[in-house]
């Protein structure tokens, strides 16, 4: 139970931080009268791409000692 409450708290803090830094913007688009209020969320867009590169990687050789005691 304590873990669940801690997880909910962390999620709430992350949501507040995202709104504070402007990555998430939530606006109410319909007032809350008889119907449920309607919200519009504008979230940050992230684009991810790939790129082919040739990278030189060092080789590692491991030599075991002959008769270590």
Image: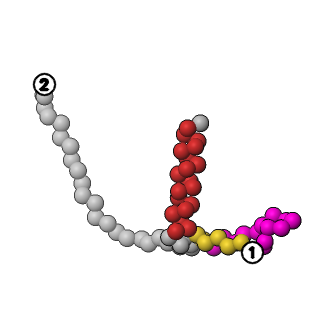
Left or right: residue 44 versus residue 27 is left
Q: Is residue 57 visible?
A: yes
Residue pointed to by mark 2: 69
> How many numbered marks, from 0 up?
2
Point out which mark residue 56 bears.
none
Crowd band around label 2 with a 10 angstrom C-alpha radius: few (<14), some (14–19), many (20+): few
Q: Looking at the image, is 58 positioned above or below residue 51?
A: above
Q: Is residue 39 magenta?
A: yes
Query: Going from the N terminus, do you reach mark 2 or mark 1 first?
Result: 1
Q: Position of residue 55 (x, y in %)?
A: 32, 66
Residue pointed to by mark 1: 29
Give the residues drawn in magenta, as a range: 30-42
Q: Examine the image and state in which quarter residue 30 appears.
A: bottom right
- Of badges 2 and 1, nearer the viewer stands 1
Q: Examine the image and state in which quarter residue 65 appears.
A: top left
Q: Residue at x 24, y 58 (%)?
A: 58
Crowd band around label 1 with a 10 angstrom C-alpha radius: few (<14), some (14–19), many (20+): few
Q: Position of residue 50 (x, y in %)?
A: 47, 70
Which element type, helix, strand or loop, lies under badge 1? strand
Q: Residue at x 54, y 71 (%)?
A: 23
Q: Is residue 46 visible?
A: no
Which element type, helix, strand or loop, lies under badge 2? loop
Q: The N terminus is located in which quarter? A: top right
Q: Position of residue 32 (x, y in %)?
A: 79, 67
Q: Looking at the image, is 4 positioned above or below residue 38?
A: above
Of residues 50 and 58, the one nearer the viewer is: 50
Q: Residue at x 81, y 64 (%)?
A: 36
Query: Mark 2 and mark 1: span between their CA atoms?
Result: 76 Å
Q: Position of residue 17 (x, y in %)?
A: 51, 63
Q: Looking at the image, is 61 positioned above or below residue 30?
A: above
Q: The C terminus is located in which quarter? A: top left
């Amino acid at each position: 139970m304590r873990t669940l409450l801690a997880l909910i708290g962390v999620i709430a803090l992350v949501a507040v931080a995202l709104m504070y830094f402007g990555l998430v913007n939530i606006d109410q688009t319909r007032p809350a009268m008889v119907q449920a209020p309607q919200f519009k969320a504008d979230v940050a867009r992230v684009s991810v791409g790939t790129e082919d590169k040739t990278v030189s990687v060092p080789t590692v050789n491991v030599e075991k000692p002959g008769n270590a005691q």
